[in-house]
Amino acid sequence: MSTVRARLAIALAALAACAALAACGGGNDDTAANDAAATTSTASAPASASTTTQERDDDSTATQESGEDSGSPESHIAPDAEVAAGLKRLKGVGATVAATGGGEEARDAVEKVWQPIEGTVKKNEPDLYLDVEDSFEQLSAGGAAKAQQGKQRLDQAIDAYLAKHPG
């Protein structure tokens, strides 16, 4: 019964995180909807041979210049405010996952929140990016102790990032 409850809790946390991400916006125009649509299509669309561009809040267009595949989550550069909000949501998902003892479903739950913002974190703070990724391994390893260690490591990495980049 506890496995069913854990899976339900993780699914609910992921759903809540997705809903919160979709509700994110920062303006009175429809750029928030466009940003959400671009994030969704970037995360789910296969890579293309052409150069991917992203429209930013200041209406400038930036060409992706990382060495990553242009369709990969690591190539998406999100606005700082979106990253800060996403990292705060990620802490909540991490806490929920740790409370349920982690497991494979945990990786899916955290990845849904992490993917739209990980490219920016990787670009700005490569070491903290690795700490976050490593914390996901601990969260998904299974077992309450490992999950709690993963949550603590995730919280430390997020707090360090937000101290340098408050959004």
Image: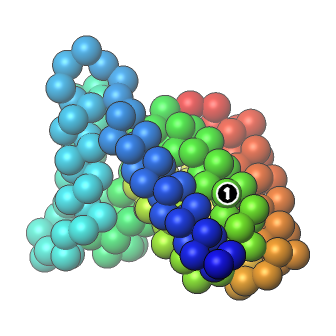
Q: In the displayed structure, would residue 99 be above or below residue 158? A: below
Work out which quarter of the rendered image holds the N terminus and state it: bottom right
Q: Where residue 106 appears, x then y in whole percent?
A: 59, 72
- Can the viewer see residue 101 in this picture? yes
Which quadrant would residue 110 be assigned to in this image?
Answer: bottom right
Residue 132 visible: no
Read off the residue under disc 1: 96
Residue 76 placed where, x, y %? 36, 57
Which residue lies most toward the front here?
1
Left or right of 31 in this view: 93:
right
Instruction: Look at 74% across and 73% down and name the residue there.
Output: 101
Q: Residue at x 48, y 64 (%)?
A: 11
Question: Residue 125: x percent and y percent?
Answer: 64, 55
User: Horizontal and vertical percent for residue 122?
Assistant: 55, 60
Name the image quarter holding residue 30: top left
How many labels were placed on the picture? 1
Looking at the rendered image, the quarter that the C terminus falls into is top right
Q: On the rendered structure, is 58 left or right of 133?
A: left
Q: Work out whether residue 26 or residue 59 is closer to the camera in this orientation and state it.
A: 26
The residue depicted at 82 percent of the width and 75 percent of the height is: 144
